[in-house]
Image: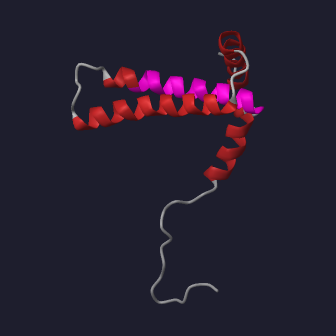
Amino acid sequence: MDSLSALQSEVAAWVHRNFGDAPLLDQAAVVCEEAGELIHHVLKAKQGIRLEENHSDGMRDALADTVIACLAFASIAGIDLEQALADTWFLVSQRNWKPQETNSCTAPPQ
């Protein structure tokens, strides 16, 4: 695989060949469906039930299906997902999710 953009082009061509001009709402539903399969395997593995299913393989497959569905959604919406990921990752990577330590002897900055 050369790049995410190249894969997005391949996925877009495949979607067009198989489904024509898929409506954006329909593709958003596919993204949710695939994400639902992912949470199914995560939850059942955590609960220790439905052990006849290989939850590790199911998670791997569902995660890949979700990304493929997202690539299709991005293509329909006219979004370069590789660029969107880079732009958004830059913003997210600047966030600090750990609580700030405060010194109880000093007043908070104003």
User: Which quarter of the rendering shows the N terminus?
Assistant: top right
- Is residue 69 a member of the stretch shown in magenta? yes
For the point 56% across and 32% down, the residue is 29
For the point 52% across and 60% down, the residue is 97
User: Which quarter of the rendering shows the C terminus?
Assistant: bottom right
Image quarter of residue 54: top left
17 vs 101, left or right, is right
Q: Nearer the viewer, residue 97 or 76?
A: 76
Total numbered labels placed on residues in the image = 0
For the point 64% across and 33% down, the residue is 25
Look at the picture and state if 92 lies above or below 82: below
Look at the picture and state if 2 lies above or below 107: above
Residue 35: x and y in percent read: 48, 33
Q: Nearer the viewer, residue 49 or 95?
A: 49
Q: Nearer the viewer, residue 88 or 66?
A: 66
Residue 32: x and y in percent read: 52, 34
Q: Nearer the viewer, residue 53 or 101?
A: 53
Q: Which residues are magenta?
A: 59-78
Looking at this view, name the residue that lies furthest to the right.
Answer: 78
Which secondary structure class fits the magenta region best?
helix
Look at the picture and state if 20 lies above or below 105: above
For the point 43% across and 24% down, the residue is 60
107 vs 82, left or right, is left
- The image's colour scheme reads secondary structure
- Is residue 45 a member of the stretch shown in magenta? no
Residue 48: x and y in percent read: 21, 33
Residue 45: x and y in percent read: 28, 32
